[in-house]
Image (spheres, grey):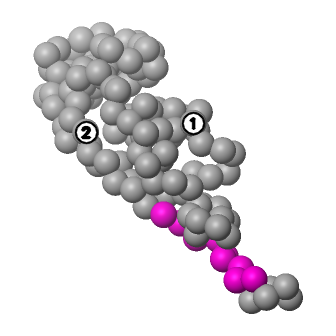
Amino acid sequence: MSPEGKLELKRRARLLLVSFWASHRLHNKSLNNEENLKLFGKCNNPNGHEHNYKVVVTVHGDSDLVTGMIMNVIDLKEYMEEAIMMTPDRMDLGVPYFTDVVCSTENVTVYIWENLQKFLPAAVL
């Protein structure tokens, strides 16, 4: 309790999980086809290959004293849909970010992080 008798809610996190399906090809434009095949193997298939992705988002912040929430989960879900779920079926062909970036899981994570930051207040992720 605070000196004013109000309950103080400390910082906490909320998790939200979303799943999505996408296809991609691991290919580095600075390498020739033979080098790409040697480096990425079957993941360099020109037709791509599929994955089911799961994304867990954790938000941090002070809980609102009225709602008890860091942020509204419905809003977070909408932001996630805008940042993640609108990804084309073939990420390496349909997402400009991957024009010059290898479409690896690590780079997909960076892409999602950067897109979510556009919608959320600073220091919430």
The answer to whether residue 57 is left or right of residue 38 is: right
Residue 106: % across, % down: 40, 40
Q: Principal SS element in the magenta part? A: loop
Task: Write down the quadrant of residue 118 in the picture.
Answer: top right
Q: In this rendering, is residue 74 above or below 63? A: above
Element assignment for label 1: loop
The answer to which of 95 and 98 lies nearer the viewer is 95
Q: Residue at x 26, y 45 (%)?
A: 19
The answer to which of 89 and 65 lies nearer the viewer is 65
The stretch of residues the image draws in magenta is: 6-14
Residue 33: % across, % down: 24, 11
Crowding near pointer 1: few (<14 within 10 Å), some, many (20+)?
Answer: some
Q: Residue at x 57, y 36 (%)?
A: 119
Task: Write down the quadrant of residue 95 in the picture.
Answer: top left
Crowding near pointer 2: few (<14 within 10 Å), some, many (20+)?
Answer: some
Q: Is residue 38 visible?
A: no
The answer to whether residue 115 is left or right of residue 124 is: left
Task: Write down the quadrant of residue 32 in the picture.
Answer: top left
Please tell me whether residue 13 belongs to the stretch shown in magenta: yes
In the picture, the disc for residue 119 is 1
The answer to whether residue 7 is left or right of residue 125 is: right
Q: Residue at x 51, y 54 (%)?
A: 72
Please give the count of numbered marks on the rendered protein.
Answer: 2
Q: In this rendering, is residue 117 above or below 71? A: above
Residue at image mark 2: 20
The answer to whether residue 32 is left or right of residue 64 is: left
Element assignment for label 2: strand
